[in-house]
Image: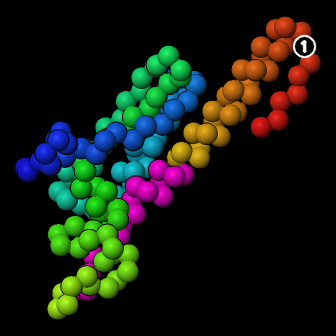
Amino acid sequence: MQTIPGLANNELPEIRLRTMNAETMKLFMPIFKERLKRNLVEQNIGYEGDLDDSLRESVKKSGDGVMGTLSFNFYGRFVDWGVGKGTSLMEAQSGIPLAAGRLTARRRAKPWFGPQYAHELKRIAELTAANTQQVLAEMAAQMNVQVEIKI
């Protein structure tokens, strides 16, 4: 297996999601991973299971919250964009060959990651907002203070 210099095991620099609640993130990351695997199956992106097997998720606590990390083989992004093996991103987006005599791009984007990531990013923000609202309401109740929280 060839590797890209400076990129360990062809893995994409990690995709990171942040939240405040560790339990929420621990439940969220495996669901995100399974949805990506489902997208690979639905889009018929095989590659002998390499991409599917390369999906890894982890959850770590840090000083300012909780971070969920997802990584996978680098070529998964090329599949998502519809580029690779002689097809540049500009050719794929425009459908016009960059050089005279070059065939038009026959690759099509198979967006298995991008749209799902955008959806999950929005969902984790919603969950974090709801979680924060609940924690603040509980703190206000303990202090015997009337507070209305709108997010």
Q: x, y (%) of residue 38?
A: 39, 54
- Residue at 70% across, 33% down: 130
- Residue at 26% across, 71% down: 88
Q: Is residue 111 magenta?
A: yes
Q: x, y (%) of residue 22?
A: 52, 23
Q: Nearer the viewer, residue 10 or 23?
A: 10
Residue 106 located left or right of residue 151: left
Please tell me whether the stretch drawn in magenta is mainly helix, strand or loop. Answer: loop
Q: How many marks?
A: 1
Residue 112 located left or right of residue 5: right
Q: Nearer the viewer, residue 59 or 87?
A: 87
- Residue at 19% across, 59% down: 47
Q: x, y (%) of residue 23?
A: 53, 24
Q: Please tell me how crowded label 1 is: few (under 14), some (14-19), or many (20+) other residues with Cα within 10 Å.
A: few
Q: Nearer the viewer, residue 50 or 86?
A: 86
Q: x, y (%) of residue 28?
A: 50, 36
For the view shown, which residue lies furthest in the top direction?
143
Residue for badge 1: 145
For the question of whether residue 89 can be seen, the reply is yes
- Residue at 74% across, 28% down: 133
Corner quadrant of residue 112: bottom left
Residue type, label 1: Val
Q: Is residue 114 above or below residue 151?
A: below
Q: Is residue 121 above or below residue 63?
A: below
For the view shown, which residue lies furthest in the left direction?
1
SS at circle 1 = loop
Q: Is residue 50 above or below residue 31?
A: below
Corner quadrant of residue 57: top left
Q: Is residue 149 magenta?
A: no
* Range of residues picked out in magenta: 103-119
